Image (spheres, grey):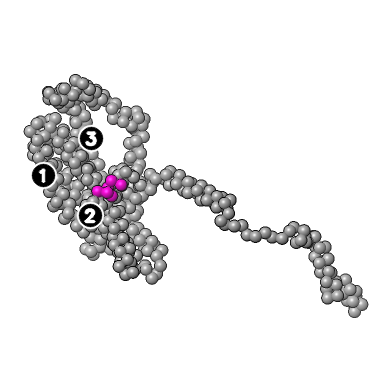
Amino acid sequence: MSEGSDGDAGQVPDVATDPGALGDAADQTVGLVADPSELGEPGAPLDRRAPFYVGFVGGLGLLTALALGTALAAISGTIVLIVVSLFIAAGLHPAVLFFERRGLRRSHAVLAVISIFLVALVLFIVAIVPVIADQIASITDNAPGWLDRLENSQRIRDIDAEYHIIDKIKEYVANGDFVSSLFGGVLGFGIAVLGALFNAFIVIVLTLYFLSSLETTKAALYRLAPASRRDRVTRLGDRILAGIGGYVSGAFIVALCAGLSSLVFLLAIGLSQYAVALAFVVMLLDVIPMIGATIGAVIVTAIALATDTHAGIACLIFYVLYQQIENYVIYPRVMAKSVDIPGAVTVIAALIGAALLGVVGALLAIPTAAAILMLVREVFVRRQDAA
């Protein structure tokens, strides 16, 4: 037995007496090991300031930025819908807080606000939309007659004799397909209507979802802040959300006042056949900052003037007076606790928002500017004062 063991032991290389024995054994099992000297010495690390490295990495960064920009441009419509839904949900949030202060649980308060919102929307569609559609059709049918009355003005006749403007407008309005032509034909008009309905449905669904999960979403976002600053971030975020909600609800109240006052006034002066449609136009346009109320007043006054001269003069006087009341009484009282920004900033923000996103940008610009100013005052200015 000892002899067999001695025989086996004789087959194991003696590393102590033969240092190359271990390498020979490794070569037999895993193959030849290359000598480092045969492949050369490793070079110095790549210089990050080298032109090739800078250009290559910069090119990759540029391509990545272009890809991200293209992706954002492709989903810009969806982003706008999400932002609009968030603002509407923020505008409905004060109503949820109102019901909570009356003793309702959060879930019941959200359910009550959602129910009221959906009922009001259905009632508007069922009761008001057909009236508005009929009155808009009546306005379209009567527009050529109003243009005929404008021809009685000597000044208008002189201008029309040179440019033939009234004949062109009359032919365009009298054509039954003029609305379709605005959207590229009947097919284009149908696609535009379906697209608008689909977007409205998406906004409603997202608004209800954001409203029901607003507290959970806020808590999740606030947890992203460091624990040492989470309390301040929460307070600033709640202040911004309250400001946005107050502005949205305040803008709706101001527009509702404009629409109801226009409805009462138009019924009083005898324009009942167009009162509902024109009042709705005024309410819708009054939401747009700066120019919306003026555009609505011009449209109503022009139609009233073409219908009856005295009614047109009355509309002109009414809207001049009402806009002063709205600008200096209604708007400041409604928005006093919502937005606190200088008038120049309001104008600049509305212009920039309109240039970027059109009407939606103009609507969102003022609360966004108010939030930015609040952050600047509470964060940057305080840090500068403490420095």
Badge 1 amino acid? Leu
Instruction: Determine the image quadrant of residue 76.
Output: top left
* Circle on res. 321: 1
Sequence-earlier tag: 1 or 3: 3
Looking at the rendered structure, the kind of residue marked 2 is Pro
Judge left or right: residue 57 versus residue 350: right
Residues drawn in magenta:
347-353
Q: Residue at x 23, y 64 (%)?
A: 101
What amino acid is at disc 3?
Ala
For label 1, count other residues whose C-alpha is less than 10 Å away and answer few (under 14), some (14-19) or many (20+).
few
Residue, x 81% and y 63% (percent of image)? 27
Which residue reaches farthest right?
A: 3
> In this rendering, does residue 208 appear at all?
no
Residue drawn 19% across the image and 50% down it: 253
Q: Which of 238 and 208 is in front in this view?
A: 238
Which of pointers 1 and 3 indicates the residue nearer the eye? 1
Tell us which disc is closer to us: 1 or 2: 2
Q: Which quadrant holds residue 335?
A: bottom left
Q: Using a 10 Å C-alpha cutoff, classify the residue at mark 3 as few (fewer than 14 neighbours), some (14 to 19) or many (20 or more).
A: few
Which of the 4 quarters of the picture holds residue 263?
Answer: top left
Per the image, the residue denoted by label 2 is 342
Q: Name the residue under label 3.
A: 133
Q: Position of residue 164 (x, y in %)?
A: 22, 21
In the displayed structure, 108 sits above or below 291; it is below
